[in-house]
Image (cartoon, rainbow, N blue to C red):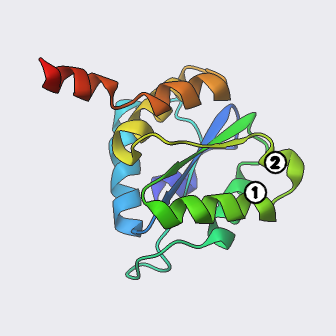
Amino acid sequence: MTSAQQSPAPTGVGIVVVSHSRPLARAAVELAEQMVPTSRPPMRIAAGLDENTLGTDATAVSAALEELSECSGVLVMVDLGSSILSAEMALELVDPELAAKVRVSPGPLVEGLVVAVVTASTGADLDSVADQTARALEPKIQQLAD
């Protein structure tokens, strides 16, 4: 069980990480957690088909969403194409009230997750967290343009 699975009782904005690779998802979560040593938002990982098999599973994503159903909103971070499909399918599997307070982020997995965790830890609402996360590559783009 990763630290993302051991998050405190869900409050504020929760985050679900959907990746084809469980080790990749764990590493991204560990990096993001280091940016916020306390008062982290609740996070869940729905990644890989098992410990060693790449893939995504809509039922695992829907289970992670259900675990965060008490959050005021849930941001879903995804890595590649079919993770988006799994996240979208998961929204069809959960209660419509829960689905209504979920956003799938177009932000990059690593940079976006760091921004999402930092922003959510401030108590920001889902719209703010989603907006900041979607723009997570802007600092890198700006730095490389200089």
* Amino acid marked by disc 2: Leu
Q: Residue placed at 35% from the left, 66% from the top?
A: 23
- Relative side of 21 to 45, left or right: left
Name the residue beneath numbered marker 2. 98
Do labels 1 and 2 touch, CB within 8 Å? yes
Classify the position of the C terminus by image quarter.
top left
Among numbered discs 1 and 2, the one appearing first in the sequence: 1
Along the line of sight, which residue is nearer the eye, 116 or 79?
Answer: 79
Residue 94 sits in quarter:
bottom right
Residue 7 location in percent, x, y?
A: 57, 47
Q: Which residue is mark 1?
A: 66
**Dot 2 crowding, Cα within 10 Å, few <14, some 14–19, many 20+:** some
**Vertical side of 128 occupied by 5: above or below:** below
Q: Position of residue 20 (x, y in %)?
A: 43, 68
- Name the amino acid type tagged 1: Glu
SS at mark 1?
Answer: helix
User: What separation in Å lies between label 1 and label 2 (alpha carbons)?
Assistant: 8 Å
